């Protein structure tokens, strides 16, 4: 049997890209789709597909062991809003894990899950393991470079977004003419960009950064076609992301999409 890898899949197209690339690299792909979040179409990209409810950690571990999976990638979105959803039923394993946390930051929450998996010999991989060629390079990627005014907004946005990410609030800041218009919190990048468009109109600059203490096993910044479409629809003129830490899903198509929208797309050098 080929070496196996499991994808714990949330929402969005990220799990699909991981599954496709893992298959191309000769791995047997098992997808554990989180009910209400994962796209069931992932079943067509996997050698095995199962769904589990959020909060069922014991069942997840048990199924991974039965399926003889020893390496796992977390891919796709599950917002921390599930912690406030009374419909989510958490098993004793999950409740016990949560009770031992000092906070519910992404690093604390998912780090504890990774540690629990490791107790059963299951390794959580860097979420970009199978998508190294999709990591954003440094520099201008689009046909149009940022204007001087946009570059000034990028500088302000980078500083603010890195602080925001370090506090586990969000990763995205929207700036216009040196004014921070919107910051991302629980609602996600696309909603923050839409809100900025409503508040300030066209001409905004969107900046998305990783945390200076980014754990690459989870929550790497991701830029996909939906965000480009939302940004274009509200008149965003420039989008800057952290190079070598941000995944550009289907990079060449994403750059073409940005060019059609006359949107400047930039990879910003990581912090030293």
Image (spheres, grey):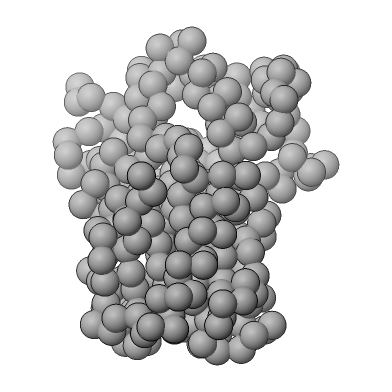
Residue drawn at (44%, 22%) of the image? 64
Residue drawn at (66%, 31%) of the image? 55
Q: Quadrant of the C terminus?
A: top left
Visible residue check, residue 214:
yes
- Where residue 109 sits in the image (x, y, percent)? 61, 31
Tell me: 153 left or right of 256.
right
The quarter holding residue 187 reads bottom right
Q: Closest to the observer: 126 or 83? A: 126
Residue drawn at (62%, 76%) of the image? 179
Tell me: 200 left or right of 126.
right
- Where residue 69 sits in the image (x, y, percent)? 36, 21
The quarter holding residue 4 reads top left
Tell me: 236 left or right of 259.
right
Tell me: 220 left or right of 89.
left
- Where residue 48 sits in the image (x, y, percent)? 37, 35
Q: Closest to the observer: 231 or 56? A: 231
Residue occupying the far right of the picture:
86
Q: Quadrant of the N terminus?
A: top left
- Where residue 143 sits in the image (x, y, percent)? 24, 82
Above or below 75: residue 195 = below
Q: How many marks?
A: 0
Above or below 12: residue 93 = above
Residue drawn at (40%, 68%) of the image? 240
Q: Closest to the observer: 149 or 131? A: 149
Above or below 105: residue 190 = below
Q: Closest to the observer: 227 or 173? A: 173
Visible residue check, residue 194:
no
């Amino acid at each position: 049997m080929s070496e196996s890898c499991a994808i714990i899949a949330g929402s969005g197209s990220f799990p699909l890209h991981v599954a496709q690339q893992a298959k191309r690299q000769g791995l047997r792909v098992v997808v554990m789709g989180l009910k209400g979040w994962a796209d069931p179409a992932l079943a067509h990209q996997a050698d095995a597909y199962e769904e589990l409810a959020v909060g069922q950690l014991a069942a997840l571990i048990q199924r991974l062991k039965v399926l003889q999976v020893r390496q796992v990638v977390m891919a796709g979105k599950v917002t921390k809003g599930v912690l406030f959803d009374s419909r989510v039923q958490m098993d004793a394993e999950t409740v016990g894990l949560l009770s031992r946390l000092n906070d519910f930051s992404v690093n604390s929450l998912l780090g504890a899950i990774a540690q629990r998996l490791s107790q059963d010999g299951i390794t959580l991989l860097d979420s970009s393991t199978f998508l190294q060629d999709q990591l954003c390079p440094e520099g201008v990627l689009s046909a149009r470079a940022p204007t001087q005014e946009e570059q000034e907004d990028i500088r302000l946005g980078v500083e603010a977004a890195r602080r925001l990410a370090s506090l586990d609030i969000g990763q995205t800041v929207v700036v216009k003419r040196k004014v921070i218009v919107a910051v991302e919190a629980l609602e996600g990048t696309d909603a923050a960009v839409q809100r900025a468009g409503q508040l300030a109109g066209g001409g905004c600059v969107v900046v998305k950064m990783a945390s200076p203490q980014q754990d690459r096993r989870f929550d790497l910044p991701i830029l996909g076609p939906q965000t480009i479409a939302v940004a274009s629809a509200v008149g965003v003129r420039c989008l800057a992301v952290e190079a070598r830490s941000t995944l550009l899903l289907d990079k060449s198509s994403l750059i073409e999409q940005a060019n059609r929208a006359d949107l400047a797309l930039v990879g910003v050098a990581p912090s030293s």
